Amino acid sequence: MRKLKIAMLAPVEEQVPPKKYGGTELVVYNLTENLVKLGHDVTLLATGDSHTSAKLIPIFPHSIRSLPVARNMEVRSDLRLMGVGRVLQYLKKNKFDLVHNHIGCFFLPFVKCINEPVVTTFHGFLKNPNDFEIYKYFTDFNYVSISMNQRQSAKIRLNFISNVYNGIEVEKFHFFPEPQNYFAFLARVSPEKGALEAIDIAKKAGVNLILAGKVDSVDEKYFKQKIRPHIDDKQIKFIGEIGHKKKVQLLGNAKALLAPIQWEEPFGLYFIEAMLCGTPVIANKRGSVSEIIIDGKTGFIVENIKEAVARIKDIEKINRLDCSNHVKNNFSAEKMTQEYLKSYKKILEKNVKKKIE
């Protein structure tokens, strides 16, 4: 495939790559870096505190989550919209072969303001009623899902050109053959991620649990009322939001990752991060779980808390090397990048055909 000139649009919530929390930003980073390695000319439109081998165009000087005013979710939404305006100004002044949109529905109303073909990767949940009001007007645009289950959450038929699973840089993790005596929870500390359910599982199974993750302003009440009362720093510990090195240690040394999700998880980078370290995952059968975890081989897929508690007793039956190899073979950044290049080719060929017609 010829070398492409690509504009990569990243969210402005976090820097690229994120210092701590930020799944979408990490995927954007992994994709961008691998495209540059392959010789493609990539321009990353992101926050100014981002780090990349590509050309960086700063949309804001710093990630907007670091701004005090962004604790107000309405203000944060307004800042995102301002960011889209700045992105559009730049795109109208510069030429690209293709624009890859990772900022979601905010950019869709302006796609026809530029001449380049655009592909939008979904990184979230498609049942958000506010997002739906936008997507329903742009069903024929080019979309990529990050799991097949994610498509099922849409209420309308969208033009999915491909499904590309998220990928991680496998060399940035290492294998842990012998775990320590605890289980881990790593996610936003929120109702949909199942933090309270993870605590319930640990208590009923009589095992130690270490929870890590950020607490958004919208989840502070949930944390104070539902989670904090259970933290005793003995059986149940909370270590807050952590960076990459601490994350690898937390996941790799755990007997298993507990992920009793309460929503239709579109992908779940923390699933593959845990497995790459050799740590099996015990997760509820929702969202993308069945596409990522092999039940009985790389973890256990359960229906409820009772099943999760029962499976904890079987966790040593899982071969930790199988977990790591599963991710290396299926969810590497290199594989993700190759799949996106196939998607780009499909879009560009369709675009040429349209011009001829």
Image (tube, grey):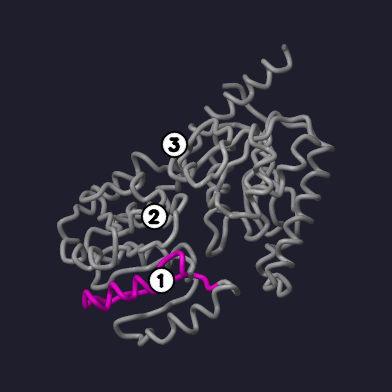
Identify the amino acid type marked 1.
Ala
Helix, strand or loop status at disc 3? helix
Residue of label 2? 273
Helix, strand or loop status at disc 1? helix
Mark 3 residue crowding within 10 angstroms, few (<14) / some (14–19) / many (20+): many
CA distance for labels 2 and 1: 18 Å
Residue 275 in the magenta stretch? The answer is no
Q: Which residues are magenta?
A: 191-215
Residue of label 3? 335
Question: Disc number at residue 52?
Answer: none
Task: Please identify, in this view, whether the residue under mark 2 or under mark 1 is nearer the observer.
Answer: 1
Position of residue 107 in the picture relative to residue 264 (left or right): right
Quarter holding the C terminus is: top right
Quarter holding the N terminus is: top right
Task: Please identify, in this view, whether the residue under mark 1 or under mark 3 is nearer the observer.
Answer: 1
* Earlier residue among tags 2 and 1: 1
Identify the amino acid type marked 2.
Glu
Placement of 232 over or under 185, stated as above or below: below
Placement of 55 over or under 232, stated as above or below: above
Between 303 and 289, the one nearer to me in the picture: 303
Mark 1 residue crowding within 10 angstroms, few (<14) / some (14–19) / many (20+): many
